[in-house]
Structures are given as structure tokens and as C-alpha cells.
Image (cartoon, rainbow, N blue to C red):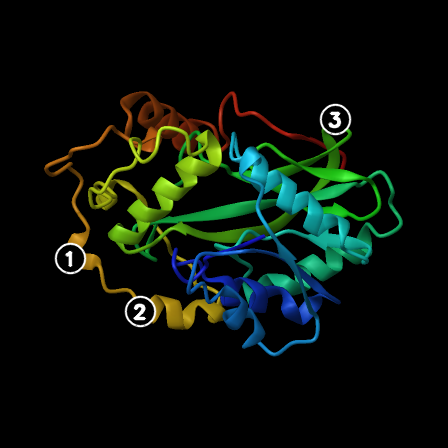
Amino acid sequence: MVRNAGKLYYPIRACIESLLPIVDEFIVALGEGDAGDDTLAQIEAIGSDKIKIYRRTWDEKLFKDGAIFREETTFALQQCTGDWCIYLQADEVIHEDDLPRIQTACAKYQNDKEVEGMLVGYHHFFGDYQHEVISHGWCAHEIRIVRNGMEAESYKDAISFRIHGRKMKVAELDVPIYHYGWVRPPELMTKKRNIQHDMHHGREGGEAHYTQDLFQYGPLGRLDRFRGTHPKVMKDWIARFDWEHHLNYGKEHKNLNRPLYKHEKPKYRILNFIEKNLNGGRQLFAFKNWVIVR
């Protein structure tokens, strides 16, 4: 589900192209965007007959607690005809090296009806393409592969799935999602955050909740360096990176005029240290929206 991809710096073409080699169809719930929205043109430029586009108008009554995201994601899932459905948000990409692992897992569990879905990991890039957030409170795993025909529905902020309100039974899959939702020029990150506020809290009150301040990513020197390789479909996006002069590559805050983000707060930094150094990288007290069966 997507709209205004170009306006808000979503790599929608890379997202779709990353999965096209292994899927029979790619469903897009395309929301009606603002004037000048080029999302449709970007998708059509891919030139694949696997892509099926459904035009949608977002219901503003659902601009609360991310309900509009759940609605559109569930709609897209209901259009799928295959055995397994793989869900990506518009700022998420799969690495080409991981495609065979997905195919192998889908074949392995095809007739194992106890497995209702599969759990994947994450790389949450932050500020630029060389730093990622590995921290308590940031999603480390989620259900992103769902067996079709089980009446699964999108859950919470469209981050996961449930079946009739219950947790799904899943197998763990050694595949990460490459999440680029926090890698944008600071002015576009501000715009995206303002619009996202609407989706969770509605538009009542006009623009009183908006900020025009340039988004501050904070000290990237405190974050983990990414040591791997990015998906090839992200090559052009990475080449466009040109906002390093706005970033703080040190370990201390500079002229901070915003509240601390969760991963910056002392409580979470302590938890993060314990998890990384004493708990094998596993999050303590983490909410798990699944039951592992394989």
C-alpha cells in the first residue's frame, strides 16, 4: 500500500523490483495521492505484467492509530491468489541473496499446515546508509510471510498479522528486511513525520501539531555501523545521498532542540548494552506477536 512515494522519498520501485524475480504477482494498493503524485508512473516504468494495481481512496475516518494502514494492507492481502504472501512496506527491500532462502522456506513448509507464517529480521537504517539502529524497542523480528487463505489480517500499525485476533504460528526465517524509512533528506523526514502524525491522530486541530524544524537524526556515532552489502536495487538511491553535511557523525548531541528518541534515552541505552553484551543480542521483555512452531 502506497501513495505519494516520490514526494516522501519512498523507494517504491526498488521495493517492488527486489521481490519480482520470485513472485507470481505483486499486488499494489495504490492510494490517490496529492497533485503531481508520480507513484503510478514509477511503478508502470518497471514494465512487469506481474504487477497488479488497485486504485484506492484512503478513508480519512481511519486516520487514527494507523488504522488506514491496516485497512489498505488487509485489502491488498485479500487480492492475493498464491500459496504464500510476502508483505513489504514501501520503504522496505529484500536483498537478492536472500531470495533463494525465501523460495526454499516456502517449499519446505508448503504442506506443513501448522506453519501459518514466517518470521523475518530487520536492518533499520538511520540517517544514512552506513548506520543502523539495533536497540531495545526497535522491531527485531516480525511476521512478513503469510500462508494465503487463512483469513489473516493486518495488525497494529500494519507491521504484522493475526488470524481472527489470535497470534499466528510461525517458523523462523534467516532473512532480514532492509528498512530505509529513516533514511531521507532531513526536510523530507520532517514532512513524512508530519503526515504520519495525521495517520495516527487525525487532522483535527489543523497544523498545530506540525513542525517545520529540520529533522535532527542525532549522534550517528552512537549507532551500529552496517557491515554488509545493500540490495543491488538500492544502488541508484544510495548514489543520490547528499545530506551528510546535515548529519552529526560524533557521539554527542549538538544543539539539540527536540526530545530524545527512544534509542537515545539512558534507560534504553542501558537495556541495549545488556542485551548486546549479556543476552546474546536478544531483547528483554519484548512483545512477541507470534508463536514459534518450527
Classify 10 as above or below 269. below
According to the image, label 3 marks what residue? Answer: 166
* Disc assigned to residue 245: 1
Is 275 in front, or is 40?
40
Ranked by sequence position, the earlier of labels 3 and 2 is: 3
Q: Look at the image and tell me in which quarter the C terminus lies.
A: top right
Q: What residue lies at 30% left-to-right and 50% top-to-bottom?
A: 127
Q: Secondary structure at mark 3?
A: loop
Amino acid type at circle 2 is Arg
* Disc assigned to residue 240: 2
Evaluate whether residue 89 shows in this view. Answer: yes
Q: CA distance from mark 3 to mark 2?
A: 43 Å
Q: What residue lies at 39% left-to-right and 31% top-to-bottom?
A: 277
Evaluate whether residue 159 shows in this view. Answer: no
Classify 146 as above or below 100. above
Is 66 in front, or is 220?
66
Q: Residues within 10 Å of mark 2 (few under 14, many from 20)?
A: few
Amino acid type at circle 3 is Arg
Q: What residue lies at 49% left-to-right and 29% top-to-bottom?
A: 283
Where does residue 258 sit, x and y in percent of width and height? Answer: 21, 32
* Disc assigned to residue 30: none
